[in-house]
Image (tube, helix red, strand yellow):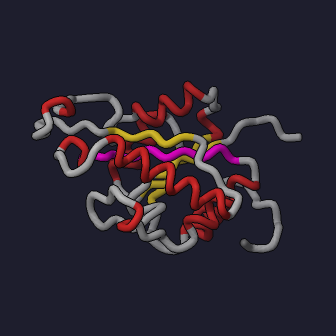
Amino acid sequence: MNTIKKAIIFDRDGVLNKDKGYIHSWDELEWIDGAREAVARLTEDGWLLFVATNQSGVARGYYTESDVQLLHEQMNSSFRELGGNITKFFYCPHLPGAPVKKYDVVCDCRKPAPGMIIRAINEYNLPKDQVFLFGDSDRDIKAAEAAGIKGFLFDGTNLKDFVYQKLAGLGYRDNGKEDI
């Protein structure tokens, strides 16, 4: 059995779900094509999966941290319906100059800073050469680089196909089972 840990970190908005601006409730969420299937297949293939997402809507007063946490629980419940699982959701509620003073913070977690990625690596003792990030902005790729991992800029197509194409280019193969 393969005991080497391997992990993928996803940005949330624009990668797992369509980025419609400050999504914070289940009824607003619309999946990116292939996102649920990607999470299911990667889970089945033994990957640890994480989300690292800036959530400045908290700092702007649009919604609360509880709203973010509830949405993440609902997303994971939906992933589990297909056999997928996000190991942990990391989010940054901070924003320099934020109207909600509690979150008016310069931090190490707001991407492009690598704090959320480094926390995932440290908390789960992940080898950096086996951790990859999929994001939809230069900010995500810069965060990956600053954390010392490989980042891929998602092109907005089918996430499952995109992820496995990039992993195949690195020498990884899926388990060969039928599509979900």
Residue 63 horizontal/vertical position (percent): 25, 49
The chief SS type of the magenta part is strand
Q: Quadrant of the N terminus?
A: top right
Give the left or right position of residue 28, taking residue 42 as reference: left
Q: Quadrant of residue 100?
A: top left
Q: Relative to 121, does residue 22 appear above or below in the rendering?
A: below
Residue 77 horizontal/vertical position (percent): 58, 55
Q: Quadrant of residue 164?
A: bottom right
Toward the viewer: 144 or 10? Answer: 10
Q: Relative to 163, does residue 107 appear above or below in the rendering?
A: above
Residue 50 horizontal/vertical position (percent): 54, 44
Q: Relative to 96, does residue 48 appear above or below in the rendering?
A: below
Q: Is residue 169 visible?
A: no
Give the left or right position of residue 64, taking residue 151 as reference: left
Q: Quadrant of the C terminus?
A: bottom right
Q: Residue at x 17, y 46 (%)?
A: 60
Q: Residue at x 47, y 69 (%)?
A: 31
Q: Which residues are magenta?
A: 47-56
Q: Residue at x 16, y 35 (%)?
A: 96
**Residue 174, magenta (yes or no):** no
Q: Is residue 128 visible?
A: yes
Q: Residue at x 56, y 53 (%)?
A: 76
Give the left or right position of residue 32, taking residue 164 as reference: left
Which residue extends farthest right? 1
Residue 168 horizontal/vertical position (percent): 69, 60
